[in-house]
Structures are given as C-alpha cells and as structure tokens.
Image (cartoon, rainbow, N blue to C red):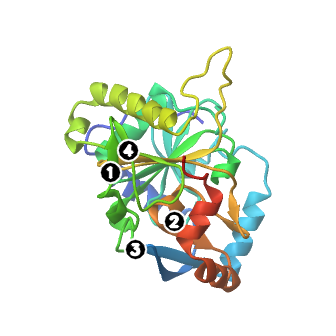
Amino acid sequence: MNHSNPLPKPGTLWPTLLERTAHARNRKAILSIPTEPEVIEQSGVAFQVRVLTALAAKALVTAAKSNADPFLPYDPDLFVADISPTHVALLNKFNVVDHHLLIVTRAFEDQEALLTREDCAALLIGLTEIDGLGFYNAGPAAGASQRHKHLQLIPLSVLPEPRLPIEPLLRAARMAGPTGTVPGLPFLHAYAPLDPAWLDHRNESVASMLACYRSLLRAVGLSVEATAERPVRSAPYNLLMTRQWLLLVPRSQEYFKGISINALGFAGALLVKSVAQLAMLRKHGPMTALQRVALPQKS
C-alpha cells in the first residue's frame, strides 16, 4: 500500500497519531490487550509487570501462528504517516499500551539486519516529534515477533509511573569514552548518554546516532557493518533509546521459563501470560530473568 501523503510537518505526528488511533478503533482494526498491572521489586528497580487476561493471551497466540508479512501490504486502517522516504509509521495492531507506534521499512528488510542510516533517521523523526521510548528487537531471540524490519516507539506519557523503572540505575553509569556500563545491570550491555539538544540538528543527529549505535555494538563485541566478509545479520540484541540515552543488550535467548522478554524488559516492563508466570517471576525476580536471557558480563 502506497500513500501519496507528504512527510509529516514538524509538530504534526502526535495529533495525527491520535486521529489515526481513533479511526483504527472505530474500524476495529486494533486490539487493545487488557492486562492487570503488578509491581515486583528487585535490585532497587520497581519492575512494572502486566498480566494478560486469558482471552487476550489466546488472541495473541492465534495471531502469532500466522506466517504472513503483516506489513506487505499493511492494513491501511493502521497507517499513521509516511515518516520518511524509506519508512512508514503504523499503529501496533495488538497494543498493550495506547499509541504504540511501529516504524517499518517500506521494502522488506530482515529484522536481524543491522540498523542503517535510514533506520536512524526514521527513529529520530519519531523521537523528535514524540518524547518516548524507541526500541529495536534484533531477531527472534531478542523477542522480535515479525521478520520484517521494524523499530518501535511508545510515548512516555502513556506509561504508568515509574515510566522507565530501569532509569534510576542509569544515573550511576561509569563511562569509558563514548560508551559506558551501568553497575546495577548484571549482564553484558553498553550505555551512552545523550544531550537532548542534539535533536535540534537532525542531519548531524542521524550521523551521531549511527556512530553511537556502532560504538555500542563494538563495546559488546558485535559486528558494526555488513561487508562481503561479514553477514548482514547480527547476533541478537535489544536496543533502547530515549532523548537522553541509548542502551544495547546482547541476547542469548528469548524466554525465561516460558516468559518472552523483548527490549521493554530491559526498560523495566515485562508481560506475562498467566498468574502462574507471574508467580514464577516473583519467585526468581525480574532482574534475574533479564540476566538469564542476556549474556554474562565481561570479566
């Protein structure tokens, strides 16, 4: 599906998102997933845990069984904006929080592929317009549910307090050049703070974000570019980004005792499908779960 709409003018993405959400609800094109909120504290973090209702869990399982690419073509009722020449912004059909935006490549690219300058440009347009959490699940082992490359953006304004439970730990980051590590995160990761003023200079910001992203990859020992010798696909990882910081976490597996964990887990937000999974998470602790699906810290 191609739209002839121009790229969004500054200041229009948020009102357009609200308008398109109302349209999609009216057309029953999106399914808001009902959950029960819980808080589990571990390692100084008040993790936000959402428990799916039985009907919601069944609906998600049914949707996951489809092998069709939901983005080629995408449902026009989910269309929000032509966010860049290479990416389109769509509503997340199965949303746990309101106004969950997908930033999808127009042509098929693999979800395990390294991010490109174009990916960074599209995400930065979203973050400039909407103060939110952007993230990328690089491959199935990182919690990606679709093979077609897509980044995601959730407005911070729709999240419960604390909006990003992991954020207090980031204040203690220890820097070693452009990247650093966070003492409270007991797994391999790389962190980089950002000056919010950089969003005022978009062209420079795209190059800066791409360079920062590659620095994070290098810091955790992952390839940074696709060449004839290096495949386009990378090892699995999660990338999280706000206007203030980036965090990259390599992954070893998707599940902790049957609980799927994606990038949101490393922001301090997890989703469980049953009371039994909630009890399992309480028993072992959310930080322990993150540690088990990540990689060990370098000695």
From this view, report whether residue 88 is shown above or below residue 206.
below
* CA–CA distance in space, label 2 to label 4: 46 Å
Residue ranking furthest to the top: 228
Q: Are marks 2 and 3 in contact (CB under 8 Å)?
A: no
Check disc 2: other Cα within 10 Å, few if <14, some if 14-19, many if 20+.
few
Check disc 1: other Cα within 10 Å, few if <14, some if 14-19, many if 20+.
many
- Using the rendered view, name the quadrant where residue 272 is placed: bottom right
Check disc 4: other Cα within 10 Å, few if <14, some if 14-19, many if 20+.
some
- Using the rendered view, name the quadrant where residue 157 is placed: bottom left
Mark 2: amino acid: Asn
Q: Which badge, 2 or 1, is on the more N-terminal residue?
A: 2
* CA–CA distance in space, label 3 to label 4: 20 Å
Mark 4: amino acid: Gly
Check disc 3: other Cα within 10 Å, few if <14, some if 14-19, many if 20+.
few
**Residue at coordinates 69% horizontally, 79% vertically from top-left?**
55
Q: Which badge, 2 or 3, is on the more N-terminal residue?
A: 2
User: Mark 3, mark 1: which one is toward the viewer?
Assistant: 3
| Quarter the N terminus occupies | top right
* CA–CA distance in space, label 2 to label 3: 42 Å
* CA–CA distance in space, label 2 to label 1: 24 Å
Mark 3: amino acid: Gly
For residue 130, which numbered disc appears in the image?
1
* CA–CA distance in space, label 1 to label 4: 26 Å
